[in-house]
Amino acid sequence: MCGIVGAVAERNITAILLEGLKRLEYRGYDSAGVAVFTNNGTLERLRRNGKVAELEQALAGEPLVGRLGIAHTRWATHGAPCERNAHPHFSGSDLAVVHNGIIENHEALRERLKGLGYVFTSDTDTEVIAHLLDHKLKEQSDLAAALKSTVKELHGAYGLAVISAKQPDRLVAARSGSPLVIGLGLGENFLASDQLALRQVTDRFMYLEEGDIAEIRRDSVHIWDVNGQTVERETVQYRDGAEAADKGEYRHYMLKEIHEQPAVVQRTLENRLGHDHVLVQAFGPQAAELFAKVRNVQIVACGTSYHAGMVARYWLESLAGIPCQVEVASEFRYRKVVVQPDTLFVTISQSGETADTLAALRNAKELGFLGSLAICNVGISSLVRESDLTLLTQAGREIGVASTKAFTTQLVGLLLLTLSLGQVRGTLEAGVEAQLVEELRRLPTRLGEALAMDTTIEKVAELFADKHHTLFLGRGAQFPVAMEGALKLKEISYIHAEAYPAGELKHGPLALVDNDMPVVTVAPNNELLEKLKSNLQEVRARGGELVVFADEQANMSDGEGTHVINMPHIHDVLAPILYTIPLQLLSYYVAVLKGTDVDQPRNLAKSVTVE
Ligand code: HGA
């Protein structure tokens, strides 16, 4: 994912920009660049394909010294990763732009601007912004005013930072669908796509909201909202050391990471949603062309990521009409596989270094797949480097060994993939996609509501503390959610837990049910609810104690031996993401009651880099 850093100060800002880029490296990128209004009065840039370290080395040979500058790490969506396509992009020699996001109408704008005599030097969508802004500046010389008029013509998602040699006392910025934050200093101010990039220079931040335009000078910040009205945005002060690797107010990293889910899901959606559709290019420059050819999907992953893949199978088949197989990597890699024509090979891994998944990807290259796509949380991982396309989840660093926020962001990534495939192949109705995009936008709020049930679930956890076995039941796409719930409980509380599709109960596991075997069920309000209720009766008839997470509209209530926890109502497609939250909280509180080492459970490692 791209990163933006900008600064306007009285000191040389190049080192600040570079440090900011380094702090954003974890998000993944393919090239980096910087533009500085130098003390010689000229706008200069330096760009490098590859790592920030290479840009740093180049700057050591050709220093750029100045008090105003912008910098960028690029993750290509339009045009190959190479120096010519790296940001900043210039129009003429006076105007520099960095951009996160996707401009969907870039082709039409490019044609128009070519007609006006502009010469393009890159294949990016971003360059049209630089030239369009330059064109606007001919009618309206004020940089912020020209930017306001420019963004009115852009469709898609953007976080933008702009500097001009003609107005070298300011940095201007615009946000729509891609985050930007202003860092406030003393006699100097900064801009970044993530406050982490600026923590070395300030602890005071002002977050831009959707549609905001900002003009940032050394000693002032002016913000206009989407309607062009001057607005004040709240200043947030961070206490020292409130970094990702800090438990903050939480007792364990796992609990902190569970509570981060609304924010990281929001981040995973950034830059990827148009107003009524998914931005397919978010998967990379060749995504649309490749997706159009896909007739099958093979997903390969391990552990929690495998469960995410199993949920995706329901989505891919029901929404995009694409046959999908899912397999654990350690099996897939050693099996003689028959590959259907035009099959996309999808891997899922938090770290991108999972040994079996990586080996499966390497084998797959010999097997005639159409192409490979990695859904991964670490941009600089082997899996990402070796795949044709990538969707980076934005979960941030996950420290708890039992995966939580990585899983829900993987699910979001897989739903974006499903919608993209359905869109490109014409198998998903535009109206359905628009509705699901709207639901995705609301998802962080829904997740927050589920997290608010924390204390209710803490109470329910008491039922499990002295038990040795538990069953988890679900139907449809909730079956893999039940599997993930069982895995969490095993991992951190060491209670034996197994998940079954609820319909399988009477084919065996019912024999185990007695009053020492609690049964946990996820029951959204869908067409399988009535069948599920019958399965629950089968459990109750054998004296099994039931804990049911049910949609508030499902009309289920507590009874003898039955504990119903009402969940906020949600669209059925997104239910697997929401219902994951209470299951994570349940295993967490059971583990706390049992006094286990929640963040580092026995015998387990965070990233399984060995076979
Ligand atoms: N579309 C621009 C920026 C890409 C981006 O934001 N990636 O996360 C480009 O391709 O350069």
Image (spheres, rainbow, N blue to C red):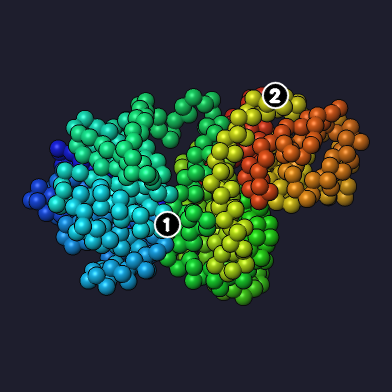
Report if the CB atoms under discs 1 and 2 are less than 8 Å apart. Answer: no
* Residue at 59% across, 53% down: 436
- Residue, disc 1: 156
Q: Position of residue 330 (x, y in %)?
A: 63, 57
Q: Position of residue 458 (x, y in %)?
A: 66, 26
Crowding at mark 1 (Cα within 10 Å: few <14, some 14-19, many 20+) = some
Q: Secondary structure at mark 1?
A: strand
The correct choice, above or below, for 332 with respect to 493 in the image is below
Q: Residue furthest right?
A: 541
Which quadrant holds residue 359? Answer: bottom right
Q: Earlier in the sequence, mark 1 or mark 2?
A: 1
Which quadrant holds residue 561? Answer: top right
Mark nearest the camera among 1 and 2 is 1
- Residue, disc 2: 459
Q: Is residue 177 left or right of residue 428?
A: left
Q: Position of residue 554 (x, y in %)?
A: 77, 39
The foreground one among 265 and 338 is 265
**Badge 2 amino acid:** Lys
Which quadrant holds residue 45? Answer: bottom left
Q: Position of residue 442 (x, y in %)?
A: 56, 43
Q: Is residue 263 left or right of residue 223?
A: right
Mark identifier at residue 211: none
* Residue at 64% across, 25% down: 455
* Residue at 25% across, 42% down: 215
The foreground one among 600 and 60 is 60
**Badge 1 amino acid:** Gly
The foreground one among 53 and 106 is 106
Q: Is residue 467 left or right of residue 191?
A: right
Task: Count up the numbered dots.
Answer: 2
Residue 556 visible in the picture: yes
Residue 47 visible in the picture: no
The correct choice, above or below, for 233 with respect to 94 in the image is above
